[in-house]
Each structure stands twice: as C-alpha cells, then as structure tokens.
Image: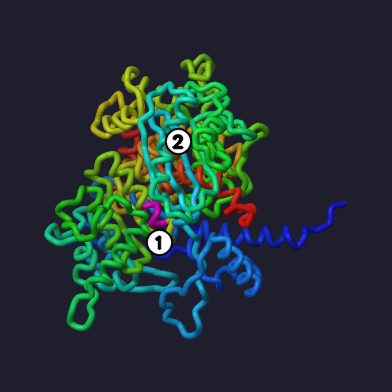
C-alpha cells in the first residue's frame, strides 16, 4: 500500500551469448504487496529472478533498493540487502530437522558451540508469526513432511533473516488443493506483515487470489505492470501469450522489423483460435 | 438537556477501554497503555489496580528489555481464569469451547450433528459438552457468559432463531433452551454465524483495524457479516446480512427458503454439487471433493467451479458497490471457492465493480480459520464484561 517501491529495476538487459533473454526490463516490488510475475515458459522470469538474487550478473540496467541505487553482484549482496529467494526445488536437506534447515549455513553460535535453544526459539517464533499450525515438532526431519509443510518451512526460512523482499518461484506447483490453499494464505500473510513479495506463478487462480499487482513478461520484455484490480483473467492470458491486450502491453505496431510483424501475426492467430 | 458523563461513567468507560485493549492485544506494558489510551500514568495505575482486584488482569515484571531504566510493568489478561463458553451450531456438527479472556481457546469438544435436530434436541447435546468441560476447572475460574453461533436468522432481543433454512429451523428458541440446560447464572447470547465470525475477524483476525468489512460465510447457504463504520450492522430485528437470498436468476433453481434463483443456489453447496453432476452428494467433504476433482482435471468439476466463481464475483461486485468495504473476507466453503476460482471472481469484480468502490478493496481469507465462529461467539459474551468490567466476576 506504500507509494514508493522497495525494489525498483530499470532497463535490465541480459544476454547469454548471442541470445538476448531480457530486454530493457523494469520491475517494481512494493512493501506490503504481492507482485505476481507471470509469463510463458522461456519468457525470462527465472532469469530475472536470478539477476535480482545476484546469481547472474546483468549486462545493463540499474537496481534501486529502498530508495538508493545498489549493485548486486553475488547472492551474498542480495542477502545483505534482505532479499531471499525460495526456489521451486526448495533447497531443503531431507536428513536434517526443521530448525537445522532453517539455520543451515548461518547457525547461531554460543562460543564454539551451536546455540540450539536460541535457534529453536527463533524458528518457533517465526512459524508462530506466520500463524503456521500444521507443523507438529520443530525437531522432525524434513523428509517426514508433506509437500505443503516443506514449502512452509522453506518460506519461514526466507522470512527468518529479517528479510524485506521474498521471491517465491512457483510455490504451489505440485501441491494438492488443501495445501495450495494453505501456502497461498501464507504468501498473503507475508505481505500483510509488511514484506514485499514477488510471486512467480503459472496458475492464474493463485495470481488473482493473492496478488496486488501483476507484472507480465513476454519474450524477455516487461509488457505490463498493472494493479490486480484493473485487469481481468482474459487480459492477463493475452498479455502472456501475445504480449498485448487492448491498450495494454506492446504497441500494435512494434516497428517495421520482422520481430514486431511476427508478434502481431501471432496476436491475430491467438485471437482467432 | 443531559449533563456530561458522571465520574462513575467515565471510570467505567476507561476500565472497559483498558480491559478491551489487553483482551485484544494481549500482554501490554503500562507505558504502552498510557500512550495508546491517552490517559495519564497514575490513572492507568489506578485502573489496573481495580481490574487486578477484580481478578481480571495480573501485573508482572516484563521480560528483559535490554534497555536502561526501570522497565514498565506488564498487564496481562487473566486468560486461564476468566472465560466464556462458546457454542457453534453448524449444518453437520456441533462445537462447544471454553474461550479465555484474551481470545485463546482453552478447551473444546466437537459432536456430529445429524441434519434435522431441533433446538430442544440440540441444547442437551451442547450442554453435555459444556458440562464435560466444567470438570477439572480451577476452583476460582469465572464464567462471564455464553455465546452461540448458529446458521440462521436470529432475533436480536432474545436469541430466537426465526428461520434457519439449512438447519430446517423455524422459530427455535435455542438461547432460552440452552440457558435452561446449562443452568448457569449467565445470559446466553445468540448470533448468526457469519455475523459473529465477522466480529471475531474484526477484533483479532484478518480485518483488525478495518472499519468497513464484509465477511461472506458459506456452508449450505451463504450469509454475510457486515461491519460498517466500525460497527456491526444488525438491522432492525437482527436479521441483516442474508445476502445468500439476493435473487440473481429469475426462475432459477429452487432455494431452501422457498424462492427461486437465490444467490446461494448458484454458489452454495447445492449449486456447486448440481453443476458438477453430483446432486446426490451432500456435505462439506463432497464440496471439497469437487475442488479436488477440478484440480485433477475433471472437466465437469472445473466448469462447476468456474461457474460458481463467476457467480460469486457478480455478487461480491454488487456488495462492494453497495457497501464500499475495504476488505471482503471469504470464510467457510467460500474460502475454498475463492482460492480455487480467484481468477473468475477477480475478473467479474473488476468488470462489474465501480472503479471508485474497487480502489482499496482487499480480498482475504480468514486468519482465525475454523475457530472464527467460536471466538466470535465468545466475543458476544465478553462484550458485556467489557462494557462494565467490575459488574461481573
């Protein structure tokens, strides 16, 4: 609900060799809001996230975080700013328990010993702060958890570090109905607690259920960033598949080059089918 | 002309405000109370002492603050000692709970409810559950009242259920019946389930801090609890919020209220099951199976969910245009429908809602989950205590 974005990207370019994956991409994420990042396979969503989290260097463009320009050159830089990413594979260790997973690589120490009581308390407080009631014991191995519970642990792990921006890559993929519902409510609660959340999803229901803004990528270009109150399901699908919808997205005459004509052709065929 | 409030009235109001604050926000330091209530330090001290003497709060040393200076004492509600009984009469089950001051559910019982039981039959079952919970109560425990949430239209004055289409009740005096069965010296307050759930979410849930809220609660039927300008909208007799009976399809499907084409015939249990080709099935589990089937690719179930979502969106758009709420909460089966068909609901709402009304509306699911009716029913009982804390206990 805030007027200034927590994270603002401008003019991001990224190429892998001759292939340009991101072209002049802009993205804003606001505190207290869920920004849904949508796009077809290969549109550049994952690449964009990896640029934000410092895994890929960008070729051009600027990052503004909390009102000041920053450069993110490594995952450590991103973590220091308070950016956490929950990837699709969750990156949890099956043979460790919930607390050990949440503090993996960043364990609290008391002298040379691990400070287990503090870690357990912090983990419990984080889960309670997210109103998570489904996890019975913090000391059970992650291998014994259901898909939804794993997702919950991975999200709690991201929240634990006083993070300001949490990016979630397809958090409901491969979950059943009941668990999807729980994870969606958790995503919403993160934002309601004041965090900026970026949600990557293919599922339009998930997007419309929790997001405040929708950012649509099409072939490496950010074709629209709109409030969820100003757009319909059909329009989002058009933006994803054709790059434009009515007055939104790419202009009809993108230019005289072959690319523009090709995308215009594709629009008409999509519309007819 | 009426004179200003007397000293007594002011004191009563301040006591109520302080108790309400710790009831809703939990343990609070005296310093914070001084700031938020806008009273001076010695007044807060005196009020706290009065409430502590009445056994409603305790004062204690705070946890280590890590800051210099003498830490301010922390005021805590006597959650374990001061409590209310809360009952919820649902279509398929009966629930009874003991809810402590501060809103924590201390104890609970759940019973199956064969559809079609009358108030006279339900009351002993609930009373039995309540009596079970009475065993092992601390000797100094104080019950401040009992609240009941029921699916149906409730007369505000005496808790008579005028019409509960989904429970088959007509003029059932559940409040009186339960009062007699319980044999306790406290009033039994009755409210519609959507209304009390809205009350709970407004006090300590998703809608905390929002003054204009619509809570849609769905089971077989659909009702709304409406908070307008920070107050519960009850209507003249207490029957408001029957949004499920807005007629949306002239000559549509027959509704349990006797009309045709009510909104709940399209978005309620029967509508969804009918559209999914499962007219024989009943109950919440059957509804959840439709969502499951839709998720697994059953085309008919998917169409049913999409259609119901479309209809839900139409109705929500109307409600948003009429009430201009800042939040709409989807509870009961409406939660599942919202999460499964949000794309349809949002799209309809965005098309049919007036731009000015849509500007700040947030769509949410309940934070208190299934406990909302119980916590809300208890809030009904606590309201009396908060209005005049020293009168009870």
Q: Is residue B16 left or right of residue A121?
A: right
Instruction: Depth check: give the residue in front, B167 or A126.
Output: B167
Residue for point 60% across, 40% down: B323
Find disc 1 in the rendering and name its residue.
Answer: A195
Please state the chain letter of the residue tagged with numbered disc 2 in the rendered image: B
Image position, residue B353 (x, y; %): 54, 38
Q: Residue furthest left?
A: A95
Mark 1 vs mark 2, CA separation in Å: 45 Å
Image position, residue A120 (x, y; %): 26, 67
Q: Secondary structure at mark 1?
A: loop
Instruction: Depth check: give the residue in front, B244 or B315.
Output: B244
Image quadrant in which the C terminus of chain B is located: bottom right
Q: Residue furthest front?
A: B139
How many marks overall? 2
Prevailing secondary structure of the magenta residues: helix
Q: Secondary structure at mark 2?
A: helix
Residue for point 34% across, 47% down: A184
Mark 2 nearby-residue class (10 Å; few <14, some 14–19, many ≥20): many
Image position, residue B201 (x, y; %): 49, 47
Q: Is residue A234 visible?
A: no
> Can residue A42 be found in the magenta stretch?
no
In this rendering, the label closer to the viewer, 1 or 2: 2
Q: Residue furthest top?
A: B251
- Quarter of the image where one finds residue B296: top left
Q: Which residues are magenta?
A: A187-191
Res B127 label: 2
Res A38 label: none
Please state the chain letter of the residue tagged with numbered disc 1 in the rendered image: A
> Can residue A188 be found in the magenta stretch?
yes
């Amino acid at each position: 609900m805030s007027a200034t974005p927590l994270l603002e990207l401008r003019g991001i370019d990224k190429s892998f060799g001759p292939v340009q994956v991101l072209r002049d991409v802009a993205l804003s994420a606001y505190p207290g809001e869920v920004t849904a990042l949508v796009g077809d396979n290969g549109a550049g969503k994952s690449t964009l996230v990896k640029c934000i989290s410092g895994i890929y260097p960008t070729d051009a463009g600027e990052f503004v975080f909390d009102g000041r320009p920053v450069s993110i050159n490594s995952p450590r830089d991103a973590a220091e700013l308070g950016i956490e990413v929950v990837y699709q594979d969750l990156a949890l260790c099956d043979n460790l328990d919930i607390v050990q997973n949440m503090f993996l690589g960043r364990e609290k120490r008391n002298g040379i010993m691990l400070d287990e009581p503090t870690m357990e308390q912090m983990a419990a407080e984080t889960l309670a702060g997210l109103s998570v009631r489904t996890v019975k014991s913090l000391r059970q191995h992650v291998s014994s958890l259901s898909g939804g519970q794993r997702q919950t642990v991975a999200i709690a792990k991201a929240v634990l570090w006083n993070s300001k921006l949490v990016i979630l890559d397809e958090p409901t993929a491969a979950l059943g109905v009941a668990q999807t519902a729980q994870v969606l409510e958790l995503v919403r609660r993160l934002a309601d607690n004041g965090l900026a959340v970026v949600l990557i999803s293919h599922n339009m229901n998930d997007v419309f259920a929790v997001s405040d803004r929708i950012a649509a990528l099409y072939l490496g270009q950010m074709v629209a960033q709109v409030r969820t109150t100003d757009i319909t399901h059909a329009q989002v699908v058009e933006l994803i598949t054709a790059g434009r919808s009515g007055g939104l997205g790419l202009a009809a005459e993108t230019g005289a080059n072959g690319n523009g004509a090709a995308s215009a052709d594709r629009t008409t065929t999509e519309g007819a089918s | 002309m009426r004179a200003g409030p007397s000293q007594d009235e002011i004191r009563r109001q301040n006591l109520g405000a302080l108790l309400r604050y710790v009831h809703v926000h939990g343990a609070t330091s005296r310093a914070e109370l001084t700031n938020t209530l806008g009273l001076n330090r010695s007044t807060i001290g005196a009020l706290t002492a009065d409430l502590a003497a009445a056994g409603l709060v305790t004062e204690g040393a705070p946890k280590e603050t890590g800051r210099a200076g003498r830490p301010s004492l922390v005021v805590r509600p006597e959650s374990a000692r001061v409590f209310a009984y809360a009952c919820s009469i649902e279509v398929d089950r009966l629930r009874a709970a003991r809810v402590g001051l501060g809103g924590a559910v201390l104890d609970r019982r759940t019973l199956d409810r064969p559809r079609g039981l009358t108030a006279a039959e339900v009351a002993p079952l609930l009373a039995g559950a309540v009596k079970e919970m009475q065993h092992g109560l601390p000797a100094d425990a104080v019950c401040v009242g009992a609240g009941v949430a029921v699916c149906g239209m409730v007369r505000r004055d005496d808790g008579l259920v005028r019409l509960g289409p989904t429970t088959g009740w007509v003029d059932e005096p559940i409040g009186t019946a339960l009062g007699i069965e319980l044999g306790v010296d406290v009033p039994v307050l009755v409210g519609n389930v959507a209304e009390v759930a809205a009350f709970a979410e407004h006090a300590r849930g998703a809608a905390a801090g929002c003054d204009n809220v619509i809570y849609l609660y769905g089971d077989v039927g659909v009702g709304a609890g409406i908070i307008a300008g920070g107050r519960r909208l009850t209507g003249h007799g207490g029957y408001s919020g029957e949004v499920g009976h807005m007629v949306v399809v002239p000559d549509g499907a027959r509704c349990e209220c006797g009309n045709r084409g009510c909104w709940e015939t399209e978005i309620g249990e029967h509508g969804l099951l009918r559209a999914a080709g499962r007219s024989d099935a009943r109950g919440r589990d059957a509804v959840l199976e439709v969502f499951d089937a839709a998720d697994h690719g059953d085309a008919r179930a998917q169409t049913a969910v999409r259609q119901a979502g479309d209809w839900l969106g139409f109705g929500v758009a109307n409600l948003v245009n009429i009430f201009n709420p800042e939040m709409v909460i989807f509870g009961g089966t409406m939660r599942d429908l919202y999460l499964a068909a949000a794309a349809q609901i949002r799209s309809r709402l965005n098309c049919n809602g007036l731009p000015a009304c849509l500007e700040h509306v947030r769509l949410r699911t309940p934070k208190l989950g299934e406990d909302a009716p119980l916590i809300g029913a208890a809030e009904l009982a606590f309201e009396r205590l908060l209005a005049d804390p020293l009168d009870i206990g």
